[in-house]
Amino acid sequence: MKTSLTLLSAGIISALSSTAIQANDLVISGVIDGPLSGGVPKAVELFVVNDIADLSAYGIGSANNGGGTDGEEFTFPAGVSASAGSYIYVASEVDGFTAFFGSAPDYDTSSMAINGDDAIELFKDGSVIDTFGDINVDGNGTAWEYLDGWAYRTSGQTANGGSFEASNWTYSGVDALDGSTTNSDAASPFPTGTFTTEGGDDVVDVPEEPAVELGVCGDDAMLISAIQGNESSSAEVGNSVIIEAIVTGTRAGGFFVQEEAADYDTDDSTSEGIFVEGSVEIATGNLVRLYGEVEENYGMTTLAMDSDVAALDCGAVDSVAAVQLSMPYELDLETVKGMVVSVTDATVTSTNNLWRFGEIVVSDTIKRQPSDIAAPLSDAYTAAVEASEASLLTIEDNSSSQYPDALNYFPTFSYANAIRIGDAVSASGPLNYSFGTYRINPNDIIEVTSTREANPVVTEGNLSIATFNVLNYFNGEVDENGDVTFDYDDNRGADDAVAFALQQGRIVEAIVNLNADVVGLMEIENDGFGDDSAIQSLVNAINAELGETEQYSFIATSDGSEIGTDAITVGLLYKASVVEPEGDATIVAMPVQQIDEDSLARMRSSLLQTFVHNESSKSFLVAVNHFKSKGGQCAEDIAEEPSEITTIQGSCNALRVSAAMTLGNALSEESLPERKVILGDLNAYSAEDPVAVLTDYTPEARGYTINTAVNTEMDDGASVEVESSFGYHNLAEEFDAEGFSYWFYGTEQVGSLDHVLASEAMLEDAIDGAHWNINSVEAYQLQYDQALRYYADEDGYAFTDVGPFRSSDHNPFIATFDLQADVVDDVEDEEDDNDSSGGSMGGILALLAAVIGFRRRTTAIKK
């Protein structure tokens, strides 16, 4: 829930952002016991550390008056997800919470009718994972002993399992929320007034202020520039002032005003705009005269309007000229905070909060994973880290609500009209500052220039090879009644036939439009190659959309057995009109690591197949791979403190290096063709160790030595130094260096985890290569499982349309080649030497015919 919780939010956010959060999905981060009649609002705040697909595993309860646990009294509903970095508010009831904070809690339950001497328990699967307070102590000593106040967690973000440590928390003290002077630990951020507090507190009487005379429009007033000043906070905080300024925009909880140009001061370091907390029935573009108190709200100077003093509408005036923000920034945004600003053709870098909070982030360019650009800790890597954090600006919906019914700045958002990573955006509106970021609140619909391409843009040849991660394509299982069910333990994909139809429809359209002659697949169900198998199901669906000469076949193992033991595997499709398999497929088992006495780290096996190109009769080999993911833990991640170089590259990096060595050695077999292509999801960015081992690594050039994993069947279980690489060429670096295959929500950066690497001989035949940005750049909410589970009823947004976009979470990469048959020089008989119609002339004509044929094939427009 993203609200203006001026008491809790900023403190908690600051604390959490400055503390190393451990791998707990959910923790208790704040508690509030309110001052209104009846002791409301009463609430608990939970911080989401990692994405949670289904909150129903979690619940909360209280322990009243030191009497021990009351058990799990509230369980979150099934099917509701939570995003990392967000907050969940659970209150005792809705009205008091809403009245106090201006927005509703996420959930309400009577179990949160807690008092200052009650403890709170957070449960997962029925077990306590975190507590606030000691469930067996009434009052908990001095840690939580006040009548009305709050507490927020400042350290120890690991869920404590019931072992509460008061030192990890900051407490407001007594009567923190009612303005009482008895609160010495934290000044109240709320306006003074009369509150009846819980537990029999005395009523706090505040003397009435004398009547305020606003005067008339045009009278003297405090200039906004004088309020803002040129320091980080206003020197006028606590003072009540009269201002006269232009209403420039509205957002939840208030509106923005800005001085008329004639009243600007001559100091460029002072802002001419400010946010006013309150509401008036005065149109944007009109001059308003009002009275209020100057406040600082977590980095944003505001004016709390006195609702007892009616504002004056001074009529329409000339519009305010927006300050153009160039990126990278050439001015300090602090100096224009509250003023109308604009950006032109800014690049969308994040849609992580697009649907949850109505936010996008823009900058001067997309932000790349530093390890996709350069070796970890190199100078180029450090420069990429700095660039990834520069010139970020949020554009946000003015409602400040969760899951807004429509984006006020882009109400036509849909599957067909989405906002994507890399799109160009122009927007204008007042500049806000909250949750640690600068934000534009647009007054009008923003302009979006889409970068979508219905087909990959690549120069054609006579052979094309692509990689495509199909995001857990599981086609169901036939049950005992002969019906197809999706309810079985190994299923990682669609959970019903409707979801599967949407998933398959999009994948089919993407592969048809990709139009590659050979396609390597990752994350397809590992259920063999029979009539009911996933790969047969997919090929059938694709071929139903294609003509006879465009049909696909798939590679199966020689005995029809599954590839490896994981629930997902790799696959290989090919067009028999272009290539034919030569010999049986080969399965390369990847290293298995012993993590500890009871657990192993495994990887999916690789699939190797040699093909003959029909037109040229050339042979080439394709190796399809899916290396170990960056999630989970391997032996190196837990045995000792990993190095920073290792940490940068994610968990199990050394095991992926061992996989690269295993693959490279397998492909070095002399009987294999010289022309080889390695493709697939290597779960390593372009400049990380596993890719370096396969391409162009030397310890001297890299600045450090790469090592294989311990505790595998390789090298008697020892970790060994890698001395050289296998010399393959990354075709993305050759032809599409600015492209990428993946956008990671955790860093909001792009990079390539999916690669097509070519041997020296294959590189000589390479023409082009391109990422096709149809998946990773698309809003996550459009994904088949998200669209159907959470947005199926979104009126007008058509999240469940079928097209190639968001058919997976990885972008495909396609490479094109020109393989030509060997030219054979015929030796002519002597009597034919003088025959001008044959001999060398015939060879020239044949060569010309080949050139013409090649030119006809190269019809696509090169990027």
Image (cartoon, rainbow, N blue to C red):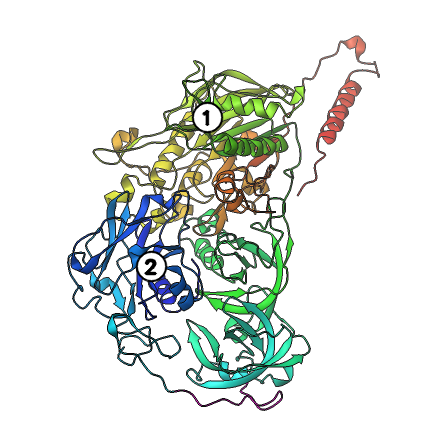
User: Is residue 673 something that shows in the picture?
Assistant: no
Span colored in magenta = 208-223
Which label is found at residue 92? 2
Image position of 32 (left or right of 82): left
Q: In which quarter of the image is residue 288?
A: bottom right
Quadrant containing the C terminus is: top right
Which label is found at residue 130? none
Disc 1 designates what residue? Answer: 476
Quadrant containing the N terminus is: bottom left
- Identity, as a three-letter code, of the amino acid under mark 1: Gly
Secondary structure type for disc 1: loop
Membership of 209 in magenta stretch: yes
> Does residue 809 lie above or below 336 as drawn?
above
Image position of 255 (left or right of 593): right
Residue 509 point in image, percent of width and height: 61, 32
- Identity, as a three-letter code, of the amino acid under mark 2: Ser
Specify few, some or many for label 1: CA neighbours under 10 Å numbering under 14, 14-19, or 20 or more: many
The residue at 41%/71% (across/down) is 298
The residue at 63%/52% (across/down) is 412
